[in-house]
Image (spheres, grey):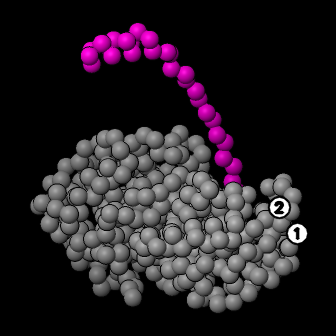
Amino acid sequence: MVTEIRQKTTVNSLPPIQQSVTVTFNYAVHFTTGLFDTKNPLLARTIATDGEPGPKKILAVVDSGFLYSRPMLPKQLALYCDRYADAMALVAEPIVIPGGEEAKNNPKLLEQIHAVIDSVGLCRHSYLLGIGGGAALDLIGYAAATAHRGVRLIRVPTTVLAQNDSGVGVKNGINAFGKKNFLGTFAPPYAVLNDVSFLASLDDRDWRSGIAEAVKVALIKDASFFNYIRMQATALACRDMKAMQNVIYRCAQLHMNHIAKGGDPFEMGSSRPLDFGHWVAHKLEQLTDYSLRHGEAVAIGIALDSTYSYLLGLLSRLEWQQILNTLTALGFQLYVSELAANMDRPEHPHCLFRGLTEFREHLGGELTITLLQGIGKSIEVHEVDLSLYRQAIWLLSEFYNSTLPTSGWIGD
């Protein structure tokens, strides 16, 4: 009987209907100062340019860490919406969520945002205004993308990391099952509004953390940009705002250029060059119970994968030293004990090398990690030598111990 059914299906089957759909996304990243000053029309103008009549409903979701430093923000936002009432209408008090990985580890926060979106009647032509650091924006973006299959999102990044990397991209997500970004979407924002004045209130760790993503993209794409960071490392560590503005702008530019022209903005394949150093970073965040900031973990990941590249003979000793010395001058700690834990048992859940499997599972397909074959030039590999990675971990430990007294590390 089964054979007969299969034969009939083959004989009577209709040809498939093939379809190709092209979708174009357009969004701008703006740079400004005093975003919520009533004299600054940028936010209202951004909303008004959608070409639709009438004031649009606006719901703000705010990172509690940023709100702590800007307690007058809700009043400022209300005054701003009153001033530009022809373009926008604030439908509720801002939703306040925790910043950092706590935002991505608590599923009740997603439910809370969805519940308010429902209760105030936001629709696909309304706007969710996400204000905060990268982790908070990841959650807010996921909430926006999954309510009504997509409420318009305006991102207002408030940290270096968010302004130069996570806040300008197309990815959103939250953590689940002990894995980074297990749940998420690819959904570009309607617009990104960067206000440089927000960076002044950052603590030293959050100021520094975002620079790691700039080092990352410079190492894989732009040697001259890396050289700028290397030469400005002391100024950046000392919170020179002009140097930081230059770094943020170029970093955002390189990230957005890759998204637009890299050929795989929604990561349908197995390649993910912008995640250089991130297989290490994602696992280290988990292994340290997220006591490491994302940027701090990325810096360690960059250092380890650069060291591995050096041991493979892809990087010269001088280039390797320049990378590690630059990261150290910026104030990053390049070794934590979790790097070496259980490293002789690669499948142990608390072994760093388990991160390779999780990295491949997250993307799908064959393992693909990015290494360096020179500053500003990347190469993708599909196999790794764990014994050589163990040697790289030992070498990083030796480097850290030799520079510890003058590393400039500032912890909480």
Say if the magenta span includes residue 9.
Answer: yes
Q: Is residue 146 above or below residue 369?
A: below
| Residue 168 seen in this snapshot | no
The numbered mark at residue 48 is 2
Q: Residue at x 41, y 44 (%)?
A: 271
| Residue 343 seen in this snapshot | yes
Of 125 and 36, which appears nearest the observer?
125
Of 346 and 92, which appears nearest the observer?
92
- Reading the image, the residue beneath label 1 is 86
Residue 182, percent from left and from top: 39, 58
Q: Residue at x 30, y 85 (%)?
A: 405
Kindly identify the amino acid type of the residue bearing the numbered disc 1.
Asp
In the image: residue 162, left or right of residue 82: left
> Which quadrant of the rendered structure holds the C terminus?
bottom left
> Which quadrant of the rendered structure holds the N terminus?
top left
Q: Residue at x 87, y 58 (%)?
A: 53
Q: Residue at x 58, y 42 (%)?
A: 261
Asked whether disc 2 touches disc 1, contact meaning CB atoms under 8 Å apart, the reply is: yes
Residue 166, percent from left and from top: 53, 63
In three-dimensional space, the C-alpha distance between marks 2 and 1, rounded to whole angstroms, equals 9 Å
Numbered disc 2: secondary structure? helix
Numbered disc 1: secondary structure? loop
Residue 47, percent from left and from top: 78, 62
Q: Is residue 202 above or below residue 192?
A: below
Q: Is residue 266 above or below residue 69?
A: above
Q: Which residues are magenta?
A: 1-29
Q: Is residue 81 above or below residue 314?
A: below
Kindly identify the amino acid type of the residue bearing the numbered disc 2.
Ala
- Sequence-wise, the earlier of marks 2 and 1 is 2
